[in-house]
Structure formats: C-alpha cells, structure tokens
Amino acid sequence: ITYIRHSAFLAEWEDIVCLFDYAEGELPEIDRDKRLCVFASHHHSDHFNPEIFTRFADHPRHTFILSDDIRTVPAGEKAPVVRTGPDCRRIFPGGKRGAMSVSTIGSTDCGVAFVVNYAGKTVYFAEIAKLNGVRLDAAFLPLDPRLGANYWMGFDAMMRSADIRKAFPMHMWEKYEYIPKFKAMSVTEAYRDRIADITAPNQTFTI
C-alpha cells in the first residue's frame, strides 16, 4: 500500500495494481506488466482528475472504474471505462490468481465506496459506510479536520463495525498531526495499533 496524497492510495498485488482517487501527487513507477485499475469514488476535484484518461492511456492493460456521478468523457478513442452506482458487483480480469471482484456501497458523501477482492485480500475505499463484521485487509477511511470536534467519529464507527486488519487515514488535507491526536484518544484503545502512521506522501506499507 502506498499513500500518494490526500485521499489517493495505490494498492499493489503481484500482478495487479489498483489506484484509488488520484487527483494529484507523485506516483511510484507502475509496473507495465501488471494490470492497472484506476478507481474514482465520486466527481469532486480532490478525488477525480480527468487527466487520468491521458496519463494512464499508454499502460498496456488498464481499466477506469468510476462512480456514475462522474460525467466526464475521455478524449480520443474509446477508453476502457466502467461506470457503476451503489449496490453493484462486477468481475474484472485479474491475473495469475484469478478474477478481481469489485463491489460498491453507497457513500455518506456522494458516489460510491469500493470493496475490492483479489487473491484472498479485501480492500475497502471511500467515505464511511458500515460493513458489519466484514473482514478487510486494508481500509482507507476519512479523518477529516473540517468536521471540527467530530473529525474522528466516522473512522471510529467503521473500526467498530468491520474487522479491519490495517486502517489508512485519508482526506486529512495534509494535517497529519490528526493521526497521533486520534490515536491518543481513549476510544481508539482497542484498535489504535491497526491505524497506519502516515506522516508524508509516498509512504509505503506492506500487509
């Protein structure tokens, strides 16, 4: 798992790469031998940048998986774009370990939340949605300072409703100090060791 910037993360398996909500920031080199899936959860400019259509167009095996509230049409030839609303499940080509499953859930913001399963690992991305009892190997969850004193409540609700192996704070507007502040709260005692300590862009974590 690589934190890019703001709410953008890259999740990489041995033969597939998933890039979530990339709007800006420095990207690591993406292996051209791996299938690339570029996700965008909703149309807000800090989660979707139409430049993705040209930036990743030359990758030999790429697919754009977008919330259906994104109306932007790729320029040029037909791009491999899949639009989806909430409560859908689609199967995509994966790699050596079989197909990749992508399920969507309604988001508390707009657009969708993605649940991606490949090679026995499950990754959750987007705004808060309750997944009671679901086992997630990685979850990308907002910790948004703009919510004032309530900045931690959605994150906490998700940690208590799902079985999350590693939680990655996002949507912090570069205010990384909110992570140790949150972890110091008594409410996080049961799960604080499962919260990633993000301090800067381009950090990489292995799970």
Image (cartoon, rainbow, N blue to C red):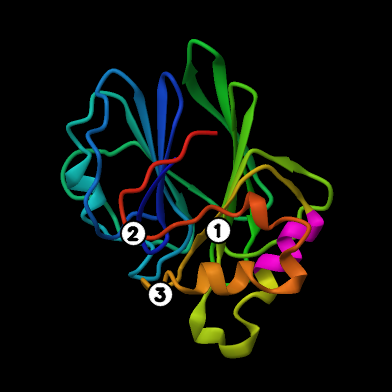
Alpha carbon distance from label 2 to label 1 = 20 Å
In the picture of the structure, the residue carrying the numbered disc 2 is: 200
Residue 145 - label: none
Give whichever of 37, 150 is nearer the camera: 150
Q: Amino acid at mark 3?
A: Lys
Question: Badge 1: few (under 14), some or many (20 or more) residues near its Cα, within 10 Å?
Answer: many
Is residue 111 in view?
Answer: yes
Residue 47 location (% of width, % of height): 39, 63
C-beta proximity under 8 Å, tags 3 and 1: no
Q: Amino acid at mark 1?
A: Ala
Question: Badge 3: few (under 14), some or many (20 or more) residues near its Cα, within 10 Å?
Answer: some
Q: Earlier in the sequence, mark 2 or mark 1?
A: 1
Q: Amino acid at mark 2?
A: Ala
What is the secondary structure assignment of the residue under circle 3?
loop
Query: In this rendering, would 202 be left or right of 145?
Result: left
Give the overall secondary structure of the magenta segment: helix
Give whichever of 1, 176 is nearer the camera: 176
Residue 175 - label: 3
In the picture of the structure, the residue carrying the numbered disc 1 is: 126
Which of labels 3 and 1 is toward the front?
A: 3
Q: Which residues are magenta?
A: 155-161
Residue 75 location (% of width, % of height): 18, 50
Give whichever of 31, 93 is nearer the camera: 31
What is the secondary structure assignment of the residue under circle 2?
loop
Would you place residue 89 above or below residue 72 in this image? above
Most extreme residue toward the right, as rendered? Answer: 133
Give whichever of 162, 53 is nearer the camera: 162
Could you tell me which quadrant the C terminus lies in?
top right
Query: In this rendering, would 66 be left or right of 202?
Result: right
